[in-house]
Image: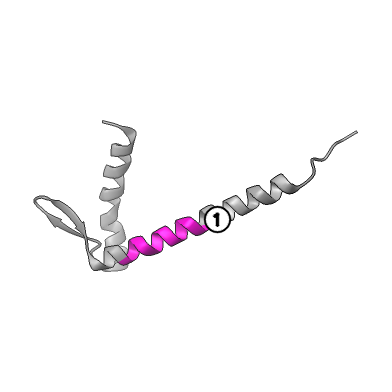
């Protein structure tokens, strides 16, 4: 079992509390697995946007810091 698989199991286990918080089902659970519900698909779209915005903000800070001249203490 890999660490990614463990993270996935934890994320799926915690989804129940997120579904409770949102008051909607994010996945359709079947004996053959899980599929995103319509609400789940909308959530994933927004989650990708949020994560992209966080990454953009991080990258913007890194680029800004790289353009600064290094300080020297004498």
Residue found farthest to the top: 1
The residue furthest left is 31
Dominant secondary structure of the residues highlighted in magenta in the image:
helix
Residue drawn at the location 25% of the way across and 62% of the way down: 26
Q: Residues within 10 Å of mark 1 (few under 14, many from 20)?
A: few
* Relative side of 49 to 15, left or right: right
Q: Is residue 8 left or right of residue 49?
A: left
Residue stretch rendered in magenta on the structure: 42-53
Residue situated furthest right in the rendering: 74
Instruction: List x then y, in percent, for residue 42.
Output: 32, 67
50 magenta-colored: yes
Q: Is residue 10 left or right of residue 67?
A: left
- Place of residue 6 in the rendered image (x, y in percent of width and height, measured from the top left): 29, 38
- Find residue 3 and report its horizontal and vertical position in percent: 33, 34
Placement of 32 over or under 5, stated as above or below: below
Q: Quadrant of residue 38?
A: bottom left
The quadrant of the picture occupied by the N terminus is top left
Which image quadrant for residue 29?
bottom left
Taking the spot 82% from the left edge, 40% from the top edge, the residue there is: 71
User: Does the magenta run of residues contain 44?
Assistant: yes
Provide residue 44's location: percent of width, then percent of height: 34, 60
Q: Which residue is mark 1?
A: 56
Which quadrant holds residue 40? bottom left
């Amino acid at each position: 079992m890999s660490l990614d698989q463990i993270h996935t199991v934890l994320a799926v286990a915690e989804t129940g509390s997120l579904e409770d918080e949102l008051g909607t089902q994010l996945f359709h659970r079947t004996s053959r697995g899980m599929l995103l519900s319509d609400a789940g698909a909308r959530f994933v779209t927004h989650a990708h946007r949020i994560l992209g915005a966080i990454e953009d903000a991080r990258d913007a800070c890194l680029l800004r810091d790289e353009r600064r001249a290094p300080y020297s203490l004498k």
